[in-house]
Image (cartoon, coloured by chain):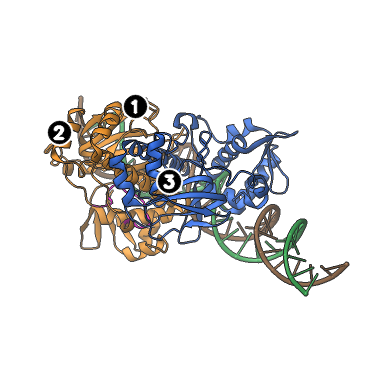
Chain colours: A blue, B orange, C brown, D green
DNA sequence: GCTTTCAGGGCAACTAATCGACCGCCCGGG
DNA sequence: CCCGGGCGGTCGATTAGTTGCCCTGAAAGC
């Protein structure tokens, strides 16, 4: 939810086009050891011919979502998937304790929804729009029939699911083997690379994320993020100016996050 | 790696059949909030007609693996997937620091391998046989061609990938929102349910897992598992007798792992 | 212009978890 | 029979991370 302060920046890019832009590589991945070896998220439609798209689109139902609106809720029954046309969807899990972990931010060309593609299971996580978005709902039964008719759709789905698998396993890998501090260093580098803008002191992370947002991404508490950022600031690695973070010594961050990549 | 002490028990079940048994539900899931709502792992071949199987099998190359042998290595190039016919494969990720996290134990009917199905990427994790196993390698290019020819194979792959997605995301969810202690309680309950046998004192976990194995499954250190088990023993929740664990008060474990499910 | 409100940030006390090292035990092999 | 390796158990020191509470400042209301 970079929306609080970054909302104005986002307002120009939504609802402008129905054509799916190709998102730049690794946008959706929050934490991954080697982005390079994983590759970018595939667009579901890339594999389809214009005619195939027509056929598939006929089965979909459009939905418009304003920033902050919930697309689907953990625990609710679901049917099929949502294909993102524009905007950005944050997918996260909430534990019974109330603790949250962000699984990913998904962009145009990806599909999101409960874990099942064909079946009608129960959502294992929730999805909310973090900027105004346009999605296309594709019911499970229709999809199952379409797959037989349009083999390229099957391939698109398989590649999409493969990517999701990589994404989630990368997350599990980071969560299982790195300390929170390492994960935070990792995340900051990643954000700097994604949203970074030049700044006299270093690289300013453009989209404003609150400490709580960062905490959800690395699976920590807000307070710990605050403390860690303070320590980083003491060491001259970053500076914070009221909910903006400037990365000064990317090399030190790189070092903090451990070897590899 | 329940093999060390449980090896004899396993020796009777391998290499006996080429027919794929249907594994009981949720075998592969180590940690998941609500096993019930996720469903069991689908067998890749369930969706295929006998004729389809023939066609697919022709493209595969059989491989026999003895207990402890590595099937594939993190970082190595890969091609396609391995379909498990018999045995059990442990899939795990090793961080640059040397720390390991077990992603899953896979059983007959599932496929394992680097993240890609069609492409030739790089393995993001390693796979070793924890009991003598039989696998069938299916090259990526063949699979891609087969999918167009045999639509049911596509459906089988999609369902398999969907399940893997659930599996990994469930793991990430647990790792991101539960404390190690809660995760351990969770795991013990799960193992008791999976491998549990009646015992005068409670439920004995049949397969012998070392403390290190358990640690890898919950993403902790061996020592911490030892300490936690000791504390549980003091509270009368479990008893340990030389690498065997008996769950006495499942209700208390249930309480420890937090609400939900 | 003053007050209220509330999200965001900070501090302090406490607990959970790690790290590294060491010992003893059991089991299997020579 | 003895030796060696894998495993379980333990200890002490240290760090990482949590819980709960309070402060601040900007925006909203009156």
Q: Nearer the viewer, mark 2 or mark 1?
A: 2
Residue A91 or residue B226, whichever sits in front: A91
Task: Point out the frontmost of discs 3 and 1.
Answer: 1
The quarter of the displayed image where residue B76 is located: top left
Quarter of the rendering containing residue B236: bottom left
- Dot 2 and dot 1 within a common chain: yes
On screen, residue A14 above or below A198: below
Residue that numbered label 3 is attached to? B220
Output the chain of dot 2: B
> Which structural element holds mark 1?
loop
Q: Is residue B28 magenta?
A: yes
Can residue A161 be seen in this snapshot? yes
Report x, y in % for residue B35. Answer: 32, 56
Mark earlier in primary sequence (2, 1): 2
Work out whether mark 2 precedes mark 3 in sequence or the reverse, and give the earlier one. 2
Q: Are marks 3 and 1 in contact (CB under 8 Å)?
A: no
Query: Is disc 2 placed on a helix, strand or loop?
Result: helix
Give residue B127's quadrant in the image.
Answer: top left
Residue assigned mark 1: B78
**Disc 2 to disc 1, C-alpha distance:** 24 Å
Q: Position of residue B44 (x, y in %)?
A: 24, 41
Q: Residue, x 53% and y 54% (percent of image)? A: A65
Q: Which residue is mark 2?
A: B54
Whether residue A208 is in magenta: the answer is no
The alpha-carbon separation of the residues under discs 2 and 3 comes to: 44 Å
Asked if one can make out residue B19 in the rendered structure from this viewpoint, the answer is no
Give the secondary structure at mark 3.
loop
Which chain contains the residue that carries disc 1? Answer: B
Magenta span of residues: B25-35
In the image, is B97 to the left or to the right of C2? left
- Please, which residue is most extreme toward the left here? B16
Spatial CA distance of label 3 from label 1 is 29 Å
């Amino acid at each position: 939810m970079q929306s609080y302060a970054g909302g104005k920046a986002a307002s120009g890019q939504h609802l402008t086009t129905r054509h799916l832009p190709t998102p730049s590589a690794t946008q959706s991945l929050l934490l991954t050891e080697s982005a390079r070896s994983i590759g970018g998220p595939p667009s579901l439609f890339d594999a389809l011919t214009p005619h195939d798209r027509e056929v598939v689109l006929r089965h979909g139902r459009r939905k418009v979502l304003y920033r902050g609106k919930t697309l689907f809720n953990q625990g609710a029954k679901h049917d099929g998937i949502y294909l993102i046309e524009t905007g950005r969807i944050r997918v996260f899990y909430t534990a019974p304790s109330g603790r949250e972990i962000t699984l990913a931010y998904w962009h145009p060309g990806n599909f999101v929804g409960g874990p099942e593609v064909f079946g009608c299971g129960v959502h294992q996580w929730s999805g909310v729009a973090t900027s105004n978005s346009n999605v296309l709902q594709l019911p499970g039964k229709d999809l199952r029939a379409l797959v037989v008719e349009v083999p390229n759709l099957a391939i698109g789905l398989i590649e999409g699911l493969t990517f999701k698998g990589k994404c989630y396993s990368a997350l599990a890998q980071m969560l299982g083997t790195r300390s929170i501090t390492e994960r935070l260093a990792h995340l900051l580098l990643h954000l700097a690379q994604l949203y970074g803008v030049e700044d006299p002191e270093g690289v300013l992370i453009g989209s404003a994320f609150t400490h709580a947002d960062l905490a959800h991404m690395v699976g920590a508490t807000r307070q710990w993020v605050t403390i860690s950022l303070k320590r980083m600031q003491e060491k001259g690695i970053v500076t914070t100016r009221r909910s903006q973070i400037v990365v000064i010594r990317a090399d030190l961050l790189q070092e903090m996050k451990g070897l590899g990549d």
